[in-house]
Image: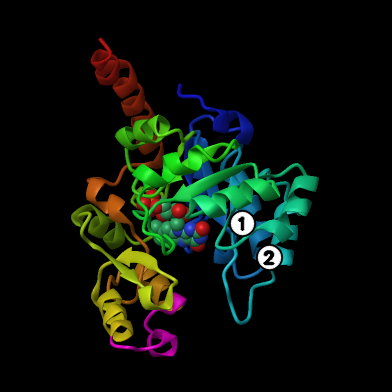
């Protein structure tokens, strides 16, 4: 066993988290993560309505009797989703843990805390982590520059970002971005984190509800196969490199604006990649961790392997160094 304060605060066996993933964080994956003793998050906005989220939470409960959470990603949007209704769906479903991301979760905290729900806020900088602690979140998950999805605009990799955050915070810190194996978990613990969060690695498991070709592409890809899109818009996203991501970069680098790439980056296109395995149908998130991924295990095999590898590393090679 590997036990940290995070395990106790969030009621989970292993210090391993599966962060929210649009189109991927459904009951199939999240229940498998829970059954393996790690903390998985259903992705609220993958469900078209708050009512559908209630049903998805119920479906997940049928597949596991272990704890799991819900990710609430708060995105800047012209017509925002009904966040209050999603929040109510989470609270009324009796979920005990929420991962917030994308923006300051301040307006959601009182209701979550009033119902005893722990909040793990995901952010990408020390200043945002410090702010999150000040407004009362129970833990922070910090995404370094390596991560899939939105790494922010500071470009600080985890090796510096995690210890820089840990020394400013007293709540548990989860290291995120670029983690895929036991070595990463041990490194995160050494840097002062109390666990790891993974997206790309869980995307490439048997239970992830995406087409087999996506998983095979992750295995084939190396750490070089990502693209940073939306840089000129200061809304950077790290995605798997493909014909569409390269086109988007080209258009924006030549002075294009968001409306010029809107169709290329549409969510429906990305969803098609995952559903049909058409790898150039749209953009899909994947991180540098692709360079560490060589197989498509079950979630349980993956979690057991990471924990065993980490333990062996701590009690074996690292203990041997301390002579
Ligand atoms: C396919 C995919 C979709 C994602 N969608 C979301 C999302 O909707 N909300 C969110 O907070 N994070 C999202 N993420 C980010 C992950 O939760 C996690 O923070 C990130 O993947 C960690 O970096 P890693 O991929 O190197 O492990 C997504 C990641 C992937 C791979």
In this rendering, which labeled residue sits more in front, label 1 or label 2? 2
Position of 237 relative to 3 (above/below)? below
Q: Secondary structure at mark 2?
A: helix
The answer to which image quadrant residue 74 occupies is bottom right
Q: Is residue 2 left or right of residue 279?
A: right
Q: Is residue 322 visible?
A: yes
Q: Residue at x 49, y 43 (%)?
A: 165
Q: Is the stretch drawn in magenta largely helix, strand or loop? A: loop
Residue 22 position, x and y percent, is: 48, 63
Task: Tell me the crowding category of disc 2: few under 14, some 14 to 19, or many 20 or more residues within 10 angstroms, Cα based.
Answer: many
Disc 1 from disc 2: Cα separation: 10 Å
The residue that mark 2 highlights is 50
Residue sticking out furthest to the right = 114
Q: Residue at x 45, y 21 (%)?
A: 1
Q: Nearer the viewer, residue 1 or 131?
A: 131
The residue that mark 1 highlights is 56
Q: Is residue 95 left or right of residue 183?
A: right
């Amino acid at each position: 066993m590997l036990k940290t304060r995070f395990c106790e605060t969030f009621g989970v066996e292993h210090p391993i988290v599966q962060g929210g993933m649009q189109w991927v964080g459904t009951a199939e994956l999240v229940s498998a993560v829970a059954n393996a003793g790690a903390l998985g998050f259903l992705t609220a906005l993958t469900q078209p309505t708050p009512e559908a989220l209630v049903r998805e939470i119920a479906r997940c409960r049928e597949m596991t009797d272990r704890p799991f959470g819900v990710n609430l990603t708060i995105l800047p949007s012209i017509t925002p989703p009904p966040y209050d209704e999603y929040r109510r769906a989470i609270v009324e479903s009796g979920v005990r843990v929420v991962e917030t991301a994308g923006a300051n979760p301040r307006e959601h905290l009182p209701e979550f805390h009033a119902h005893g729900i722990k909040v793990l806020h995901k952010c990408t900088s020390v200043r945002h982590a410090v702010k999150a602690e000040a407004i009362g979140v129970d833990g922070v998950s910090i995404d370094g520059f390596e991560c899939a999805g939105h790494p922010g605009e500071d470009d600080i990799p985890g090796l510096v970002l995690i210890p820089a955050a840990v020394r400013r915070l007293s709540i548990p810190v989860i290291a995120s971005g670029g983690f895929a194996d036991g070595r990463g978990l041990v490194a995160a613990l050494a840097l002062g984190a109390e666990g790891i969060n993974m997206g790309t690695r869980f995307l490439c498991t048997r239970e992830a509800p995406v087409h087999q070709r996506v998983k095979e592409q992750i295995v084939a890809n190396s750490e070089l196969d990502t693209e940073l899109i939306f840089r000129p818009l200061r809304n950077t996203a790290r995605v798997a490199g493909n014909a569409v991501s390269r086109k988007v970069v080209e258009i924006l680098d030549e002075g294009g604006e968001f409306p010029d790439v809107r169709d290329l980056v549409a969510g429906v296109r990305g969803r098609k990649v995952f559903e049909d395995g058409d790898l150039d149908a749209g953009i899909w998130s994947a991180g540098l961790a692709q360079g560490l991924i060589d197989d498509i295990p079950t979630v349980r095999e993956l979690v057991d392997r990471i924990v065993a590898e980490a333990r062996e590393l701590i009690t074996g090679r690292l203990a041997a160094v301390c002579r």
